[in-house]
Amino acid sequence: MYFVYILYINIYIVLGKMKKLVIGIGGVARSGKDTFAKLLKTELKSVGYSCESLALADPLKRDIDGFCWSNFGISAFTDKTEEKDVIRDLMVGFGNGKRKISEGKYFTRLAESRINSCYADVAIVTDIRFDEYEEDEVFWVKQKMNGVLTHVARFDFAVVEENEEGQMEGLNQRTFVEPANETERINDPKIRDAADFSFNWPTFEEDYERRCLPYVEKFVQWMIDRRRIEIK
């Protein structure tokens, strides 16, 4: 009887892991990945799904946080753009070293362990950035975890100015947030091309979460239509 009970428990755990949905979010720095993840988490909860959000870079930040504090007076977990710019190259270099010795698997292995140990229905990974190795982050999300890869880009409308001929230029043109470094410049187009769902949203200066919400709702409806989730 005890053996049968243990067997049922193990089957329940395995099935639970198989049903867990992983959603990866790609995009350059400051494109709105964290905003998208935050709103997506709330929206999925509203239709009956528990969610866990995590970043592949979390272990990296923990590893070098003390070094950043002691040398720059900046936390590796800072949300301030100007502070991130100071330590970005350091973080990229450290991360690239770990990725190189593991062929891109170091951070995904850590994330996978965390995902498998959590009880959430959906795991949202907020920083899918690389597609360099054969089994890199794109492969991990889409193939190994059977998940959904999304890509977000943010743009501003160009400033409308009058040229020398008296004509107005810039109307309705979009200026997208540029990659923060050469690594992003190389990898972000690969992430975008591999994404199952991608979208562009404008910069909202005021009430931005409410105004971003329709983009998130459209993605949730897309997942429902493709039977990746269902309303409980």
Image (cartoon, rainbow, N blue to C red):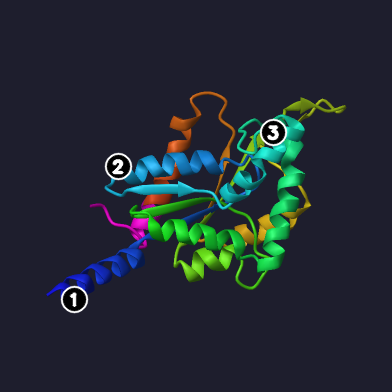
Residue bearing the label numbered 1: 3
Q: Secondary structure at mark 2?
A: helix
**Total number of numbered labels?**
3
Q: Secondary structure at mark 3?
A: helix
Q: Decide: few, some or many residues near mark 2? Use Cα within 10 Å; few <14, some 14-19, many ≥20.
A: few
**Label 1 packing within 10 angstroms: few (<14), some (14-19), many (20+):** few
Q: Dots 2 and 3: beta carbons under 8 Å? A: no
Residue in view at x 39 percent, y 58 percent: 117
Instruction: Residue 206: give x, y in percent of width and height.
Output: 53, 23
Q: Which amino acid, by three-letter code, is at mark 2? A: Ser
As drawn, the residue found furthest toward the right would be 164
Residue at 56% across / 53% down in the picture? 56
Comparing labels 2 and 3, the label whose residue is closer to the camera: 3
Q: Which residues are magenta?
A: 221-232
Q: Given this view, does label 1 or label 3 mark the residue nearer the observer?
A: 1
Q: Is residue 222 magenta?
A: yes
Determine the CA span between mark 1 and mark 3: 52 Å
Q: Secondary structure at mark 1?
A: helix
Residue position marked by numbered label 2 in the rendering: 46
Between residue 212 and residue 124, name the one nearer to us: 124
Q: Which is closer to the viewer, label 1 or label 2?
A: 1
Structural crowding at the residue carrying mark 3, measured as other residues with C-alpha within 10 Å and reported as few (<14), some (14–19) or many (≥20): few
